Amino acid sequence: MINKPLLMPNKTFFKGIFLNLFIFLILFSLSNCSKRKSGEQPVLDSAYVTQYMNSKPAFKDDLYWAMQFYKAREYKLGWFKDHEVVPEAEKMLQAVSKAEEEGLDPARYNIVDFKKLFKDLKGIKRDLDKRDALEQEIDAALSATYLNWASDYYRGLLEPREARKADWDVKRNRMKLDLALQTVLGEREDKLPFASFQPMHPQYANLKKALANYRQIKEDGGWPKIPPGAKLKVGQRSELVPLLRKRLSAFIARDSVSEQGVNNTFSKDLSVALKRFQDQNGLTANGVLTPETINFMNIPVEDRIRQVIINMERWRWIPQSFEPNYLIVNIPEYKLRVYENGKEKMGMKVIVGKELNSTPIFSDKMEHVVISPYWNIPPGILKEEIAPKAASNSGFLEAMDMEVITKDGGTVDPSTVDWSAAGTSGFQYIVRRKPGPKNDLGRVKFIFPNSMNIYLHDTPSTQLFSQSKRDFSHGCVRVEKPIELAAYLLRNAGWDRSKILDQVSTREEKYVPLKEKLPVYIVYFTAAADENGRVRFYDDVYEHDRKLKAMYFSKL
């Protein structure tokens, strides 16, 4: 007979032993970790970063970037080296303290009392746990402050959805703030000026100078108002002349309008200076003190300051760098420019949409040029202008060089068409104007496919380019020098001016693809400045400024 042990160990018994041993080993390991050397730098973890960023409303929106930054560095501190705050921290805080120079509110970023934190850190000597905890807090605070500021400074105070409400749908700046922060700390190189806290675009930098200039003018008492109805002739002496000279000096170098102190004569030179002022601000440039010019001059300096600031905001929305080659249209300026390798290659006047048919603000890529294009009549114009005349006069379309076709391209007799359905979804035809001198698109159009059916094109109404305000179209952009533009864009596709004009003379539509797609930006800037901060203001033709001002300054 075999005697069984009184107590037979079971599986539960062994599990208990191993569990106790496992817990002991963990506690021993943690105990050793807590006794690390005093020279070791503490680290953060995802829970700490999340808790800190969510602890202050101003930091919550940048939690993603903070997590990306610390995750990439395995949660090691970024702003400390050998328990000393790195010099980049002071540079960053100085940049943030100057937020007002950027048209931003410093109070948005002055969330953390760094003076107290740095003082407390300096006072800690032997208590390593307190020192580590404070270093963790300071590191998270510096990162949060930078991300909070950089988000507004580089990407814009308004969110993309808010910018769209302000009628801006240009491709946005999608700068990665975590990588920018790495650049600031000298951990990666970047061609963009993150480490020096400088703006992305020279146009922004110029407006920043203008903002400083106009704030100084405001501090000095602003500029004088020109009395409504005032008139001056060259050679005339008037007490208005010193007022005019002082007003112009805010725009033109003071020396060019000073004329040896007090001089009440409206000289030829002063008339030329006035004409220059008018020309560069989109006014009728005649050197005469017109009501239009007086109204423009009398806009208060405070309003101009706000106008400069919102245009700086628009530059923050622009991609952080343009492509080497691109085309840009500034609607309020009525101007098109083409850039090659970053330098302006050509420029010309444009005609944009009327306020009721405003040209949209967006970006896309030009794919091809159409020589001798047909013009498909838009539904609204077809219904309101063409259909009533075509219904009452069977010869109207032929006289206007128009035709009716099916969607398959077959020709249709206009007399067989039910014109009452024109402009509706039930209308099964296309009405188009043939290539030729009467064609509303002129000799050439430039296509960058988009859902709004907006494109650039020629026009037979060339006399409109002589107007200072050129908002006459139904939304598309008419260009002043279409053949020159086409020849430039197709220069690598075997086309020159002569060949283009030969194709125009055939009155046969010809699609020519570009060798490389060209980025196109249709933008809306009502203020531009030169490198000295002298500003050119343009009319808020679609009142987009008014909407943007309300949205922007409600956040400050």
Image: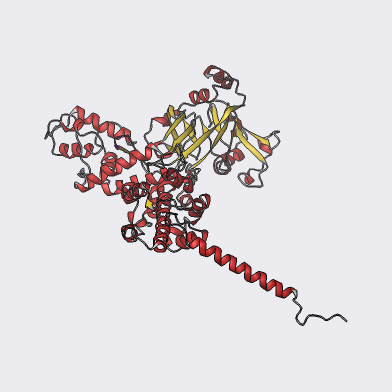
Q: Which residues are magenta?
A: 528-534
Residue at horizontal 52 percent and vertical 19 percent from the top: 497
**Does residue 284 appear anywhere in the picture?**
no
- Based on the picture, tell me whether residue 68 belongs to the magenta stretch: no
Residue at horizontal 61 percent and vertical 30 percent from the top: 398
Q: Position of residue 486 (x, y in %)?
A: 52, 25
Farthest residue in the right direction?
A: 1
Of the pair 65 and 86, the residue shown nearer to us: 86
Predominant secondary structure, magenta span:
loop
Of the pair 450 and 90, the residue shown nearer to us: 90
Q: Position of residue 287 (x, y in %)?
A: 25, 31
- Residue 296 relative to residue 490: left or right: left
For the N terminus, the quadrant is: bottom right
Q: Position of residue 516 (x, y in %)?
A: 57, 29
Of the pair 425 and 204, the residue shown nearer to us: 204
Q: Is residue 410 above or below residue 106?
A: above
Of the pair 460 and 239, the residue shown nearer to us: 239
Question: What sort of colour scheme is used for the picture?
Answer: secondary structure
